[in-house]
Amino acid sequence: MINLNGSNLQKFPLQNLSWERDLIYFEGPLLSEFTVKNGEKYLKYWCDCNDEYNRWMLFRIKEEDRLRLVLGELSLIDCIKDKAGNFVFFVDENEHKSFYQLVDLSDVPQEYFPELDSYLNIEDYVEDKNITSLVFEDNWQFEDLKEVYRKLTQLYDFIFVAKKQLGTSGGMPWHGGFSAMHFYNKLKNIIPKISNSELGAIHYASPGYMKMEMDTDIAELTFKAINLYKKEQVVIDQIYSELFNRIKDLGLNNLNLDVAIDDFSKDTDCQKNYKLLTSKLFCVDLNWLNKFADSDFERCKIVMAHTRRLKTFYSFIDDKRVRVVTSLID
């Protein structure tokens, strides 16, 4: 192995390193992520070996850079050269011994740096349990970020209640936007408090990030719903538009609810497009809808409200203003 121009350390200063995940693995880990007690993240990168030892480079990484690395937006070499600070640690180790050095970044042999195009492609990346991370740029107003948070929370709440088959019908006339707002408030109240989505952290920078606490299983279903909308967007938007226009032409939103329910049930176009729209959405179950609302008109309103939120949230992703740290959205 190459002789390093560094300072030998009698004791490794980063005690209680906790392994989080392997980011590159080939017949053993080549790049792994660790956390120390104060929450700082470190990457451990294999760079050399001889008959006795493997040599690793260990360096700190900011959370916003770690997220961009796993998204494939920031190269590994940039994480080291531009983001790691002035020094890195080297560890020569085997099953029985470890030797540590602190090396100035300018003295790191060129052979130990990754290739210039060292972007990760992690197909099955999973964030920390019950954590969802979003990355955004600095051209966002705080009110816009609140809207991102609100829409993802509403999608999560809908999927949670639909998947768990929770809730009972009644209580909302479904005329105008008023009932949609109260519908999502109702969903929030149905979900057990321990499973409610919460804003864990927000870091406003370029890039910034948002951490949301969500049940991992439901979050994954939510991402699958968003991804299915992405794949079927043209068809879903067309069905929604035809349904919206038909309801508008019939003036159902301006009628007495009982009359609107009756007219909707008798209109073949409304019935056809409502059922077609429902069939195109992930995790929207007719059995649950039938339990949650008393009429097809009200059920249709629920499905349309969900579709609008899928469309709005996906527009943030499509414009590349927001990236969700998951492999479940193509």
Image (tube, rainbow, N blue to C red):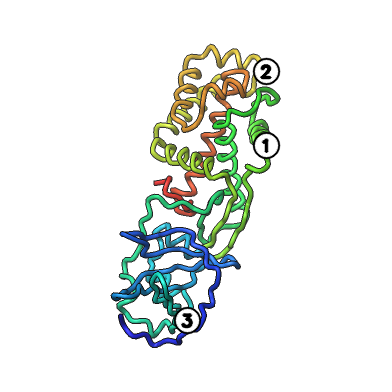
* Residue 69 sits above or below residue 298 on the image: below
Nearer the observer, disc 3 or disc 1?
Answer: 3
Would you say 211 lies left or right of 52 here?
A: right
Identity of the amino acid at label 2?
Answer: Asn
Nearer the observer, disc 3 or disc 2?
Answer: 3
Secondary structure at numbered mark 1: helix
* Residue 113 sits above or below residue 321 on the image: below
- Residue located 61% across and 57% down the image: 201
Secondary structure at numbered mark 2: loop
Percent position of residue 222, x then y: 51, 40
**Few, some or many C-alpha atoms within 10 Å of disc 3 (few <14, some 14-19, many ≥20)?**
few
- Residue 256, labelled with which disc? 2
Q: Which residue is mark 1?
A: 185
Q: CA distance from mark 3 to mark 1?
A: 50 Å
Reading the chain from its start, which is encountered first: label 2 or label 1?
1
Identity of the amino acid at label 3?
Answer: Asn
Reading the chain from its start, which is encountered first: label 3 or label 1?
3
